[in-house]
Image: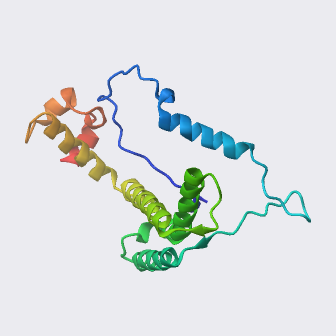
Amino acid sequence: FLARCLIAYPESNIGTRVYTSEDVTTRASVQEFHRACESWLKRELPVSDDDPQALEPPTISFEVSAGEGYAEYHDEIEMELRAGGEFDLVKETGAKMPELAGRIAAVLALFESGTVPEILSSAYWERGKALATWYLHEANRLKVDVSKPEVVENAEVLIDWLRNHGRQFTYASELQRKGPNRLRKSTRLNSSH
């Protein structure tokens, strides 16, 4: 199920945000996005003549160069799904990414032109591929981060704390008093250095 989802989990910026009174809903780009969404949500869906409960979405074909790009992208990803490949840990997501790239490209074309394109251009394909690739790398990053042993995570927290405080070393007693909360227990502290 998650292989079909586009998941993002950016690094937190807690502690660096400052208040701003800007109302983002007044931005022209946000208003245009809302208008486009509203327009599409109000349209009648294409349904089957035989079964009004069954959708019959239009078929979208690739421009020749976009189709070639799709095949290349498919093969590039496929090679990295092998054992030891870059996307070995996210095989299910990687296997679906070329198809998702095409869907993203079609949505971009739909929002920009206001109509469902019959032929998907290589320009839209490249943009869809770029977004899909970002999501694939994000899925891979999350999978790798989740699979880190706790001792590695604790060591990374310690290194970050030292860097943020302009230090190269510290004493365990100081870390227990002033260090990162997650390392203040002696059992975690001992495993992180």
Residue at the image point whose x is 37% and y is 75% from the top: 85
Is residue 112 visible in the rendered structure shown here? yes
Q: Is residue 56 left or right of residue 94?
A: right
Residue 124 in picture, x, y percent from top left = 49, 63
Q: How is the image coloured?
A: rainbow
Looking at the image, which is closer to me, 181 or 8?
Answer: 8
Quadrant holding the N terminus = bottom right
Residue 33 in picture, x, y percent from top left = 55, 41
Residue 10 in picture, x, y percent from top left = 39, 45
Residue at the image point whose x is 21% and y is 44% from the top: 190
Residue 88 in picture, x, y percent from top left = 42, 71
Above or below — where is 21 with respect to 148? above
Q: How many marks?
A: 0
Above or below — where is 49 with respect to 31? below
Q: Is residue 104 left or right of residue 10?
A: right
Q: Quadrant of residue 136?
A: bottom left
Above or below — where is 53 with respect to 58? above
Residue at the image point whose x is 18% and y is 44% from the top: 159
Q: Quadrant of residue 35?
A: top right
Looking at the image, which is closer to me, 146 or 56?
Answer: 56
Q: Is residue 33 left or right of residue 40?
A: left
Is residue 5 visible in the rendered structure shown here? no
Above or below — where is 7 with respect to 136? above
